[in-house]
């Protein structure tokens, strides 16, 4: 439905901000992106994590060469609890709904395109995921065209709260963005030490990132310039997610190009 609404807005001459994914079918995505281009409007995808201050700092260290050539990326993304069954049934599954953020983050951090995906999934905590033939736990390895490797781990249920971490290891060093809690204060008493638990909701964790992405969209619309997260970024993330889903189902590596060719089979 996202892509159809994007096309309708574009035909009305409106700049568009769209949450991910644009659609679950890359053929339809390309059709609607062509409609956006013909209309001459701007389209920004809602990959809010690109606007997180911590992740932006890691990306800046990659861009300025401080870390050398990226070799290994490690991305952790774990939710506090699974979403409702009704949501899962129409979401496209873990890879297209949840891990797609991490696949986009890997592209953002490396500045490279993913060539091959190896994924494994399991349904360990959510009966609804199992009933729907989906997974709630997954590990995905991405092999980028420039040679870098990325490992992404996802879980629908982390009992300690929302867990979001990124690490980039390069030829000159390493950068780590740890999980963010409501505050960083540690307490020590006769009973031991403790810290406040992690955030329990993604809007709390990424509040500033959401504000930053919408502010940037407004600026792009006002100045009539290309948004930093455009339609092609949305398409590439869907292609990687489809490759991961196919890899987990088949139990073998899948090239991103193969995933698109497999649509409809």
Image (tube, rainbow, N blue to C red):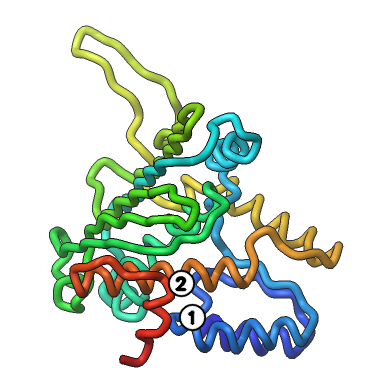
Mark linked to residue 230: none
**Spatial separation of the CA atoms under disc 1 and disc 2:** 8 Å
Residue occupying the point 26% across, 10% down? 189
The mark lying in front, picked from 1 and 2, is 2
Mark 2: few/some/many CA within 10 Å (<14, 14-19, 20+): many
Say what secondary structure mark 2 lies in: helix
Residue occupying the point 68% across, 72% down? 43
Left or right? Give the position of 135 relative to 233.
left
Q: Looking at the image, is mark 1 or mark 2 earlier in the sequence?
A: 1
Instruction: Tell me: residue 13, above or below residue 160.
Output: below
Mark 1: few/some/many CA within 10 Å (<14, 14-19, 20+): many
Residue placed under numbered mark 2 in the picture: 238
Outermost residue on the top side: it is 190
Residue 48, horizontal then vertical, whole percent: 55, 55
Q: Which quadrant: the C terminus? A: bottom left
Q: Is residue 182 visible?
A: no
């Amino acid at each position: 439905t996202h892509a159809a609404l994007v096309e309708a807005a574009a035909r009305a001459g409106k700049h568009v901000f769209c949450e991910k994914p644009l659609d679950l079918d890359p053929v339809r995505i390309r059709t609607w992106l062509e409609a956006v281009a013909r209309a001459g409007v701007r389209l920004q995808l809602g990959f809010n994590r690109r606007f997180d201050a911590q992740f932006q700092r890691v990306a800046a260290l990659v861009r300025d060469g401080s870390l050398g050539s990226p070799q290994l990326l490690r991305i952790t993304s774990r939710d506090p609890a699974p979403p409702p069954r009704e949501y899962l049934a129409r979401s496209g599954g873990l890879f297209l709904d949840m891990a797609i953020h991490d696949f986009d983050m890997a592209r953002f951090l490396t500045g490279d395109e993913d060539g091959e995906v190896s994924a494994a999934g399991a349904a360990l905590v959510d009966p609804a995921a199992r009933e729907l033939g989906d997974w709630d736990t997954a590990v995905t390895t991405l092999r980028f065209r420039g040679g870098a490797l990325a490992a992404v781990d996802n879980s629908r249920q982390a009992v300690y709260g929302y867990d979001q971490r990124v690490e980039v290891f390069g030829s000159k060093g390493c950068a780590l963005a740890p999980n963010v809690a409501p505050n960083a204060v540690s307490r020590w008493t006769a009973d031991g030490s403790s810290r406040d638990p992690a955030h329990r909701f993604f809007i709390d964790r990424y509040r500033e990132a959401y504000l930053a992405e919408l502010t940037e969209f407004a600026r792009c619309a006002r100045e009539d310039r290309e948004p930093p997260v455009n339609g092609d970024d949305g398409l590439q993330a869907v292609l990687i997610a489809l490759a991961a889903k196919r890899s987990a189902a088949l139990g073998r590596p899948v090239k991103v190009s193969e995933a698109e060719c497999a649509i409809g089979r």
